[in-house]
Image (cartoon, grey):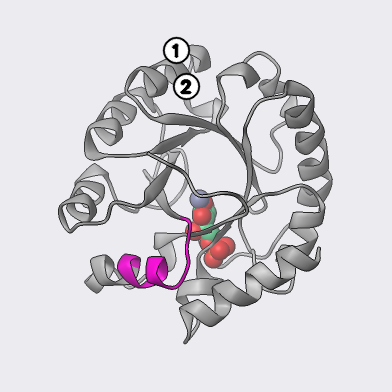
Amino acid sequence: MNLPAPPWICPSILAADFACLGDEVADVLAAGADTIHFDVMDNHYVPNLSVGPLVLSALRKDGIDACIDVHLMVKPVDRLVEDFLAAGADFITVHPESTEHLHRTLSMIHEGGARAGLVFNPATPLSALEGVIDMLDLVLIMSVNPGFGGQAFIPSSLEKLRQARQMIDASGRNIRLQIDGGIKIDNIGAAAAAGADAFVAGTAIFGADNYAATISAMRDEIADA
Ligand code: DX5
Ligand code: ZN
């Protein structure tokens, strides 16, 4: 698939109205979203349960052909990687703690035709990047502990973004640097200034009355950063 040019706004479906998810996804895309961020939680790796590959398949069958980036908060992860590849994921992003063999997991994602992301919890050091950065298309910095929408942004994430930006630039690869958790109009500029070029937002977008105005205000803050 042809990907949009960064910066990307990536609404998290976790904050959408699940009773009409297809319409919600179509609405944020019409409002200017670049990817749909699809949060998968298993009540084991994180203490919450969300949605699985059937729901992604349903969105594809409903005609959603935009880029969908799947954030897997599940352990073990490999079995579900297969299912999300089959369901039509464009990006699959995994936590290093969720697999015994990260290189194999990332290889599976590529062999299945998707792009691969690696995600860092607030307490996970970036050193896990070193052995696998050549396999990555996306690095995701968590600015909350994973498991729930609506949490407060952890300020130390900005320094982590700066470090990740340096590592990505040094790699010379075309890797998106995504931030996830507590992103709103009033802090998205700081994340952009720290090097992020893809911005997940759940509550701030789906909780707003006007999706297009919110996404547009976010873009203005990024442009001014
Ligand atoms: C948290 C998820 C996030 C979350 C973001 O575990 O990975 O994507 O839905 O929601 P907000 O933007 O409300 O913090
Ligand atoms: Zn997420």
Residue at (44% x, 12% y) in the render: 104
Residue indicated by mark 2: 99
| Label placed on residue 201 | none
Q: Nearer the viewer, residue 98 or 197?
A: 197
Residue 187 appears in the rendering? no
Image quarter of the C terminus: bottom right
Q: Is mark 1 within 8 Å of ligand 2?
A: no
Q: Is residue 108 above or below residue 81?
A: above
Residue at (40% x, 51% y) in the render: 38
Of badges 2 and 1, nearer the viewer stands: 1
Residue indicated by mark 1: 104
As for residue 32 lying within the magenta part, the answer is: yes
Please tell me how many numbered marks the rendered image carries: 2
Looking at the image, tell me whether mark 2 or mark 1 is earlier in sequence order. 2
Amino acid carrying label 1: it is Arg
Image quarter of the N terminus: top left
